[in-house]
Amino acid sequence: MIDFRYHLVSLIAVFLAVALGIVIGTTQLNGPVLTNLQGQVTALQTDKRALEDQSRQLQTQLDDVGSFDEAVGPALVEGSLTERSVVLVVGSDDVAPDVLEGLTALLGSAGATVTGTIRLTTGYGDPVNDAAVEAYASGPGRPAGLAPADGTDAASVTADLLAEVLMVPPAVAGTPGPVPAAATSSVLAGLEELGVLSRATSSVTPADYAVLLTAGTLTEDDALPRTAALTDLVTALDRRGSGAVAAGDPTATEDGGLIRALRADSSVSAVVSTVDNVSVPAGRISTVLALAAESRGTTGKYGTGEDTQPVPPAS
């Protein structure tokens, strides 16, 4: 009769055989598997180094193009805005200082005078400030002699007031001239007290043209009303003066970006020129040339985005 010890020895033998098979199998497979994995790692490291080299080469080429554009920019825009004036409105904290400085210098090369720069705060277009801003813009903040506020809500009333004190009306018979510098200063001081803007230059006076600079996107709860307020402002600046251009970086063409919103509204894009690469020298050249095109009654979409022209058409 087969006793318990026989079963025990048989089970132990089976387990030993399985264990021995696993060891032998692992040993046989370990070499090829390890070699294969090492080969894949080596290939990935090679690809990574090649991509890094390619990235450096492309960045070098981009820097060279940017340096070239920056060098030839003054010559390309020379005389395009002779004896004209431009006011700059910075509509986003994400606008880099070198963009503002570069555009200001290029406008000077074009023969234009920059009459000042204002910065809109995050409070501009914020519904929290609507009541106070509307009361000021349609009441005591409106200089004597100006027509009643043109608008039905805080954003449009404020945009109209700002446009009236920042823009020089086109020289058309019967059209009143620009408001006095004191009126501009008074309105800006009042809005500064309300926390919706600040003056970035010691003085700001009315100009023929306006450039609204923007960057990035808005994702906060108040993104829609703020975008609407900026849209009202740039269209009011265009309407009250000889033309306006909204210039932003490539991210401003994404969802939540001002350039995207302006281009999506056919009634706005028909009158306000937009530039989507002002963060590079080529975009700043396009911004200046877009102002010159506005003086000839030409409005367009410029830059590298979809359905755009690389640069405004020559005169």
Image: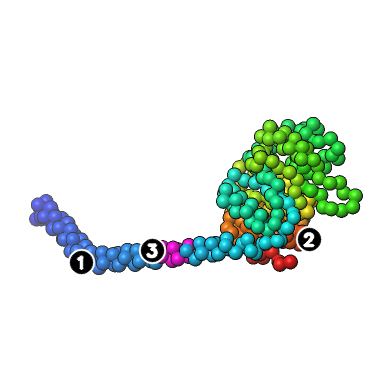
Residue at (73% x, 43% y) in the render: 205
Residue at (86% x, 40% y) in the render: 147
Residues at marks 2 and 3, CA–CA distance in whole angstroms: 51 Å
The amino acid beneath tag 1 is: Gln
Residue 271 in the image: x percent, y percent?
A: 76, 56
Q: Is residue 293 visible?
A: yes
Q: Which residue is mark 2?
A: 297
Q: Which residue is mark 3?
A: 48
Label 2, residues with CA under 10 Å away: few <14, some 14-19, many ≥20: few
Residue 59 in the image: x percent, y percent?
A: 48, 62
Residues at marks 1 and 3, CA–CA distance in whole angstroms: 32 Å
The quadrant the N terminus occupies is bottom left
Q: Which residue is mark 1?
A: 28
Residue at (31% x, 65% y) in the render: 42
Q: Residue 10 versus residue 209: which sits nearer the camera?
A: 209
Judge left or right: residue 160 versus residue 42.
right
Mark sitting earlier along the chain (2/3): 3
Residues at marks 2 and 1, CA–CA distance in whole angstroms: 80 Å
Residue 23 in the image: x percent, y percent?
A: 18, 61
The quadrant the C terminus occupies is bottom right
Residue 48 in the image: x percent, y percent?
A: 38, 63
Mark sitting earlier along the chain (2/1): 1
Q: Quadrant of residue 127?
A: top right
SS for tag 2? loop
